[in-house]
Image (spheres, rainbow, N blue to C red):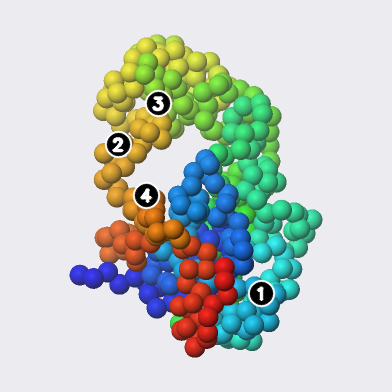
Amino acid sequence: MTQIKPLEGMLVLDFSQFLAGPVAATRLADLGARVIKIERPGEGDIGRTLAFAGSRAGSDTVSFHAMNRGKESVVADMKDPADRAFVMRLVARADVVIENFRPGVSERLGLDYASLREVNPRIVHGSITGYGRSGPWAKRPGQDLLAQSIAGLPWLSPGDAPQAVGLSVADHLASCHLAHGVTAMLLRRERTGEGGTVETSLLESLLDLEFELLSVKLTDPAALGEGFGSDTGGEHGAHRFLSAPYGIYPTADGNLSIAMNPVPKIGELLGIAELAEYADPQSWWDHQGEIEELIAARLATRPTAEWLEILDAADVWCAPVHTIDELVRHEGFVEIGMVQRVSRTEADGSRVEVDTMMSPLRIDGARIAPANALAAPLLGADSAAVRAELGEGVARVA
């Protein structure tokens, strides 16, 4: 049976750059939408040159391909009256506009919801900012590490020094929230006939991530005070606010993570007699460091696989800690089936291929198949074709 994607027939105009906005638009593309990326002449999306790990594929970065796979690219200068008129004709046909400008920029460019609605009352406008449109942080640079820092996220890992999450977690979460909001607004439009605007920010996405922490802090501030999940832990703890044995421990040939489990049960299974005395759950906090050290010393004596055999048989919540190399070689990674190969032809005629991820969603029991096998478009690659759709002449040179 041919898979019918939920957003087939929808047209999305993506004016965003970097990560959060483009990935939100890619999530809509995965669901079947046609996405046209509107880029500035000359350099286009700055993400074309910001290389994750310095890796490139053809004239763009591998990360840019991953964020913008399957899209079309049109070049337009919003400060040029002719180009602006062309973009507004596209807006009149579009279902969704995505942007992630700093507050005030979309209004200057005429890409805010009020301006777009005059052109297309049914338009759904999706926006991501760094920290919202008002308040003391509104004009600060909206970047992942900076948003993590303002949200206090680096202090949530165990230890005496702040440690940032090593991936762009704020950007990715914001992309999910915006794609979620846009699809909800499209559903509302189907019921009411009216468009609307939906927005989120890097900061709000991180505050949502911290909902457990913030709920406890606001409701019971003393619960997060000094001495509870802060100064008692050892070097193996994996969460500032969860007690032993929650942590990551070295084994004879790797590392093993252990989640929430009764300490005496862990002691019995691992043969650590000293842990039997910690029957009171409060002691798992009060003696967190000592408990962790006892577990670490024992686990270091045998390989990970041997400990997993023992712990899995007892239904203990645990897992091996994979390196990225181990992850991508593992049969479980292959079985989950999220890798796709995309490609494109470069300006010089050479062929570039990129192996990247597919949508994490399954619909009707099947992975969402890619609409095509295209990598990210060359800058302005589709300008002529899109202009021709609107009955216009030769496109601006990228």
Relative side of 289 to 315, left or right: right
Q: Is residue 1 above or below residue 87?
A: above
Percent of width and height locating residue 163: 62, 34
Residue type pointed to by label 1: Met
Q: Is residue 68 above or below residue 260?
A: below
Q: For marks 4 and 2, give the CA distance.
A: 16 Å
Q: Which quarter of the rendered picture does the N terminus lie within?
A: bottom left
Between tags 4 and 2, which lies in front? 4
The residue under label 3 is 256
Tell which circle, 2 or 3, labels the residue nearer the N-terminal end.
3
Residue drawn 27% across and 69% down?
3
Helix, strand or loop at disc 3? strand
Q: For marks 2 and 1, give the CA distance.
A: 48 Å
Between tags 1 and 3, which lies in front? 1
Pick the residue in front: 35 or 226: 35
Residue drawn 31% across and 36% down?
329
Q: How dense is the environment of label 2, judged by Cα within 10 Å: few (below 14), some, or many (20 and up)? A: few
Residue type pointed to by label 4: Asp
Helix, strand or loop at disc 1? loop
Tell which circle, 1 or 4, labels the residue nearer the N-terminal end.
1
Residue drawn 38% across and 70% down?
32
Helix, strand or loop at disc 4? strand
The residue under label 2 is 330
Pick the residue in front: 346 or 337: 346
Tell which circle, 2 or 1, labels the residue nearer the N-terminal end.
1
Tell which circle, 3 or 4, labels the residue nearer the N-terminal end.
3
Give residue 78's mark: 1
Tell which circle, 4 or 2, labels the residue nearer the N-terminal end.
2
Tell which circle, 1 or 3, labels the residue nearer the N-terminal end.
1
Q: Residues at badges 2 and 3 in contact (C-beta under 8 Å)?
A: no
The answer to whether residue 96 is seen in the rendering is: no
